[in-house]
């Protein structure tokens, strides 16, 4: 099989690597018969993305997302580092600041669903994610109501 070599900007290539890792992660649960092969592919894609640019927020978020139930300590460390970064100044451009709202959302979910729960911290992060991505359906209609229910 011949390899097609495409000259893409590194940020786009890293995004593709992260998306490929996510897709294989989904296939891990959708195709249980081949889950080991899918997990190997996820690891390869994430390793390649980290090799290209280890500090890219997209790559860091994807790494945290994939490992959140396997290594929650590392996941929280990566997400905490991401949410301490300054908010994106231009959220509608394809640049490596994409991972910050997503990191806020994932850390909010994590703080709500892992013991001990941190409901106040979860709500603060969910609201920050919503400020960065107004109208985000998941945060508005699913995560914030779950946080409100946990508060009761």
Image (cartoon, rainbow, N blue to C red):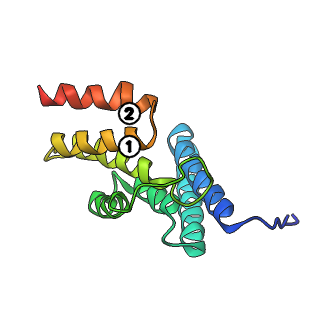
State which quadrant residue 140 falls in: top left
In the displayed structure image, the side of residue 144 where residue 151 appears, left or right: left
Q: How many marks?
A: 2
Q: Quadrant of the C terminus?
A: top left
**Residue 27 place in picture, x, y as percent:** 57, 43
Q: Quadrant of the N terminus?
A: bottom right
**Residue 79 place in picture, x, y as percent:** 34, 58
Label 2: few (<14), some (14–19) or many (≥20) C-alpha neighbours in 10 Å: many
Q: Earlier in the sequence, mark 1 or mark 2?
A: 1
The answer to which of 7 and 65 lies nearer the viewer is 7
Residue at 76% x, 64% y is 8
The answer to which of 89 and 69 lies nearer the viewer is 89
Q: Secondary structure at mark 2?
A: helix
Q: Are marks 1 and 2 in contact (CB under 8 Å)?
A: yes
Q: Is residue 113 visible?
A: no
In the displayed structure image, the side of residue 52 where residue 82 appears, left or right: left
The answer to which of 89 and 52 lies nearer the viewer is 89
**Residue 38 place in picture, x, y as percent:** 57, 53
Residue tagged by mark 1?
129
Which labelled disc corresponds to residue 139?
2
Residue at 81% x, 67% y is 7
Q: Is residue 82 visible?
A: yes
| 71 over 126 or under it: above or below | below
Residue at 33% x, 59% y is 75
Q: Secondary structure at mark 1?
A: helix
**Mark 1 or mark 2, whichever is nearer to me:** 1
Label 1: few (<14), some (14–19) or many (≥20) C-alpha neighbours in 10 Å: many
The residue most toward the bottom is: 51
The answer to which of 46 and 119 lies nearer the viewer is 119
Which labelled disc corresponds to residue 70?
none
């Amino acid at each position: 099989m011949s390899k097609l070599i495409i000259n893409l900007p590194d940020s786009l290539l890293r995004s593709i690597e992260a998306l490929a890792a996510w897709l294989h992660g989904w296939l891990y649960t959708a195709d249980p018969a081949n889950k080991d092969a899918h997990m190997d592919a996820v690891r390869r894609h994430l390793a390649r993305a980290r090799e290209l640019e280890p500090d890219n927020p997209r790559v860091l978020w994807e790494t945290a997302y994939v490992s959140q139930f396997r290594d929650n300590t590392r996941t929280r460390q990566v997400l905490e580092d991401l949410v301490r970064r300054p908010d994106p100044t231009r959220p509608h451009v394809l640049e490596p600041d994409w991972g910050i709202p997503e990191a806020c959302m994932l850390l909010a979910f994590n703080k709500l669903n892992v013991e001990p729960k941190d409901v106040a911290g979860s709500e603060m992060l969910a609201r920050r994610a919503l400020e960065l991505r107004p109208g985000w359906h998941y945060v508005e209609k699913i995560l914030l109501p779950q946080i409100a229910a946990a508060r009761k």
